Amino acid sequence: MPLRMVVALVLAILLACIPEIHEQCPLITEKVQAPVLPADFARVDALLIQRAVCMTNEVQQLRGSLARSFRIYFAYDTLPPLCARLQQARQLAASGKARSAGKKYQALLVAAQVIELAIAVHAFSEYSDGVGVPAGEIVQMQSLFGDQMVPLLDAALSEDPVRIQRALAEHGAQYGAWVEAFGRWSSQVNAQVPRLRVAKLVWDVGMLVVATHEAAGAAAELAASGRPPVLPMPVLVEGGGAAAAGMSQAAYLELADALRRLIASGALDATVVVGLAHLGASGSPPPELPTSFQMSAGGEETTAPGPLRFTQTTASPVFSNDGSFAGRSISQVAAELRSGALKPAEVPVEFIARDGNRLIVNTRSVLPLREAGVPEAQWNLVDRTGSPVVEKTISERLAHNGLGSAGTDVVRITGSGTNASSYQWPP
């Protein structure tokens, strides 16, 4: 057996023996309800929870050996203290201590910006490693990101508005350069899934929160100068950023208006919010991504992904007892998606690629998305191709259902007697 295969086998065995990583944040894992908060703080709180859920989902998709230390760092050293600070911010806001709550909320907004871009760096690194970029180049890129962005994260964690504003001014252009570099890469790379994963993270940091703070930026500058605040210009939210991040335009405007009011009341610092608004503007040359990877990424047309296919012919109308939607029905989850209580990003759909098809791993997660009419472009698709456990599970499921690698485009919902329904893909 070649040495490379032996090394790969040993690594696979070692990784299989490492305990599973579990994120430590009751606000997410146990969906702890927020106390009754003032309306403007409630909107900022909801944004932070949404971003925490999305970031957790993205980190869970990092499967390579290079990303394991980052997953551990995120699950045990990053997420728990941030969740604890959010809980403290909630308590302060609920008890009427608006200024103290505002300092924590604005610090968390800055920290979330840095961490989400860090996840994009690791998603990019994982794909780079998979296509053969030397590990040294990848580590060098990660080190550069750390050197430039850790001071910004440290400032956010200090909760000192003056220090945060100074760090935003010093490192904002570098942040924008990373956003620009990944945006350019995601428009060129051939591989559909990693391209969309990185692009989604870049959209979120570059179009959701940054654009939101740009909408509040004019108000922040007015508040800083002592003049009365004004409503944000609608043109700032008509570019599609809110839709890309899964927010309606109305919710987007309400969030921007809430930020404006919090600035005017003194709960948030105008200089910090203005600094956040300028994070997306690059005044620095983009960082050099690994050269050999850039060469492998350009020059060819992007290959369209294969069709999504079911891997079983029947499914229960109720989710199993060991998942995020334990005991709930497909229709209940679909209703939450329609009402906005649940975001498409919170319903990940896992699949593996085989023989030109994308075979669905968690069938029931697809069905409420379909029932709620959520376009596939907005789904949180998780590629589990190459996972030995998942590949084996799908092979056994296909055989049990008498299906080949093409799967099926129809699944029948059981347990409904003569009224049983069927779902077909495509509809």
Image (cartoon, helix red, strand yellow):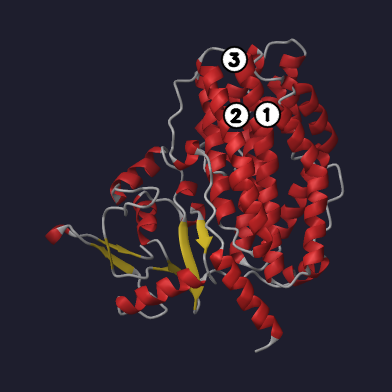
Tell me which label, 3 or 1, sits earlier in the chain.
3
Q: Which residue is mark 1?
A: 107
Which quarter of the picture shows residue 163? top right
Which element type, helix, strand or loop, lies under badge 2?
helix
Q: Amino acid at mark 1?
A: Ala
**Relative to 71, residue 173 above or below:** above
Q: Nearer the viewer, mark 2 or mark 3?
A: 2
Packing grade of label 3 (10 A; few <14, some 14-19, many >=20) is some
Q: Where the N terminus falls, by quadrant? A: bottom right
Residue 219 % position (x, y)? 69, 20
Q: Which residue is mark 2?
A: 85
Residue 19 % position (x, y)? 53, 58
Which element type, helix, strand or loop, lies under badge 3?
helix
Kindly identify the residue that appears in the image at 60 percent across and 69 percent down. Answer: 14
Q: Residue 98 got which mark?
A: 3
Q: In the displayed structure, does residue 53 sit left or right of residue 241? A: left
Mark 2 and mark 1 in contact? Answer it, CB < 8 Å. yes
